[in-house]
């Protein structure tokens, strides 16, 4: 809790289904609270509050008018009682949804769950992330976040004369595979990729279309097809490549990793892949970093389109989503890299400062007291 928020924290439970959950509305000075809904056995109030704060900054950095919020249900998404628990959770929040908060997808919730939420509240606009058949925007399937990561990478690469350079990508899931596809299309040479099943590298370049089609068939096990190209898991970040895209886990580059990295550009597809110490070391070494909430903001741009489409009888136009993601992420990447350089701060610090300036201005205009 600080001067930015949260504005509202609601913990709910129900002994009949065993449901326990929380909604945190962090800051709505720029618009209605919007952020995904997480279901995991370990969810707690602090985790959801931190994620709600990240959403406040993400919306402000992409300059879209929604506020930061997040919801979490402490339950196993594999539970046979998932639907009952979810219905109980959203029923308890019917006073806040959709006026102050709109549900969405995060870990543990699928498009089918979003459809259940809307059914329970009798409101087509209670949740975004619903299936295409219900007029929703299936943004993971479309690969919008990964596309945006590649667009941000291309913009940053152009500033460093690295267009068409070698790229290593950690993670080949929703974000990683779509980033690889777009980078390949833009003429980059993908020299390493990894999944939870292992990592592969080829200094002469991997065949990205072949990897994409194998992923479609066998998922993470696509790496098993290339026994001769196997490298140690984690090494994909340190191969000889000008650009590195961590797109799997958080906390993968610490201070030591930052000193060992060979790349000249890091584009954060995953959330929180670098520690603050790593960010500082990379800055001192002259390695550019496109921060997570700039590079992976394709997800929030898609969510903004999904918010628009909630009550529309027309299917959302996906071309417009890709065009907006490209335009916004390229502009933000250039602005943040430039500001960080001119103020001698890390790109994360520059991005956070920009977000705080925008949220602070909105609070001032609404007559709310300003954080000191
Ligand atoms: P995902 O589950 O679709 O894919 C994760 C990928 O990482 C898989 O290929 C998995 O095999 C791989 N992986 C897991 N452990 C690994 C390891 N130890 N080494 C190498 N690879 C490993 O998840 P996603 O949606 O692609 O999300 C990836 C990251 O991007 C997360 O940090 C997520 O928070 C962030 N993100 C995702 C979106 C989105 O729209 N999906 C938006 C913003 C941020």
Image (cartoon, rainbow, N blue to C red):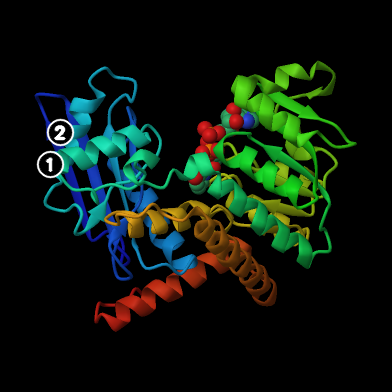
Picture coordinates of residue 78 (x, y %)? 34, 20
Could you tell me how far apart the alpha carbons at marks 2 and 1 are, in whole angstroms? 6 Å
Picture coordinates of residue 172 (x, y %)? 63, 34
The relative height of residue 211 versus residue 352 in the rendered view (above or below) is above
The relative height of residue 92 versus residue 69 in the rendered view (above or below) is above
- Residue 92 numbered tag: 1
Residue placed at 18% from the left, 29% from the top? 19
- Residue 88 numbered tag: 2
Label 1 crowd bin: few (<14), some (14–19), many (20+), radius 10 Å:
some
Residue placed at 68% from the left, 48% from the top? 182
Q: Is residue 326 in sight in this rendering?
A: yes
The relative height of residue 65 versus residue 131 in the rendered view (above or below) is below
Dots 2 and 1: beta carbons under 8 Å? yes
State which quadrant residue 305 falls in.
Answer: bottom left
Q: Quadrant of the C terminus?
A: bottom left
Q: Please indicate whether residue 371 sits to the left or right of residue 282 in the image.
A: left
Label 2 crowd bin: few (<14), some (14–19), many (20+), radius 10 Å:
many
State which quadrant residue 67 falls in.
Answer: bottom left
Q: Please indicate whether residue 306 sits to the left or right of residue 272 in the image.
A: left
The relative height of residue 49 versus residue 363 in the rendered view (above or below) is above
Residue placed at 30% from the left, 67% from the top? 31
């Amino acid at each position: 809790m600080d001067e930015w928020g949260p504005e509202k924290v609601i913990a709910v439970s129900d002994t009949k289904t065993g449901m326990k959950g929380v909604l945190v509305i962090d800051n709505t000075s720029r618009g209605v609270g919007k952020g995904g809904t997480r279901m995991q056995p370990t969810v707690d109030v602090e985790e959801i509050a931190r994620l709600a704060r990240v959403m406040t900054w993400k919306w402000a950095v992409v300059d879209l008018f929604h506020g930061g919020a997040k919801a979490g249900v402490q339950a196993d998404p594999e539970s046979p009682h998932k639907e009952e628990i979810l219905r109980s959770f959203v029923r308890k929040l019917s006073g806040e949804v959709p006026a102050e908060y709109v549900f969405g997808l995060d870990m543990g919730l699928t498009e089918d769950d979003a459809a259940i939420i809307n059914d329970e509240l009798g409101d087509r606009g209670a949740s975004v992330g619903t299936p295409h058949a219900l007029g929703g925007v299936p943004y993971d399937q479309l690969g919008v976040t990964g596309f945006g990561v590649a667009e941000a990478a291309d913009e940053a690469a152009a500033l460093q004369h690295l267009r068409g350079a070698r790229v290593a990508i950690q993670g080949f899931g929703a974000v990683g595979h779509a980033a690889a596809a777009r980078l390949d299309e833009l003429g980059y040479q993908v020299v390493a990729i990894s999944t939870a099943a292992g990592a592969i590298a080829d200094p002469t370049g991997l065949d990205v279309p072949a990897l994409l089609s194998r992923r479609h068939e066998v998922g993470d096990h696509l790496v098993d097809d290339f026994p001769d190209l196997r490298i140690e898991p984690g090494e994909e970040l340190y191969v000889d490549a000008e650009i590195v895209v961590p797109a799997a886990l958080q906390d993968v580059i610490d201070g030591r990793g930052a000193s060992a990295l060979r790349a000249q550009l890091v584009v954060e597809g995953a959330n929180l892949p670098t520690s603050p110490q790593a960010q500082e070391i990379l800055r001192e070494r002259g390695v550019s970093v496109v921060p997570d909430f700039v590079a992976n903001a394709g997800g929030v741009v898609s969510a903004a389109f999904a918010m628009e489409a909630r009550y529309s009888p027309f299917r959302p136009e996906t071309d417009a989503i890709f065009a907006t993601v490209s335009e916004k992420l390229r502009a933000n990447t250039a602005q943040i890299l430039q500001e960080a350089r001119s103020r001698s701060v890390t790109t994360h610090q520059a991005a956070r400062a920009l977000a705080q300036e925008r949220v602070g201005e909105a609070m001032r205009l609404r007559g709310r007291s300003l954080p000191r």
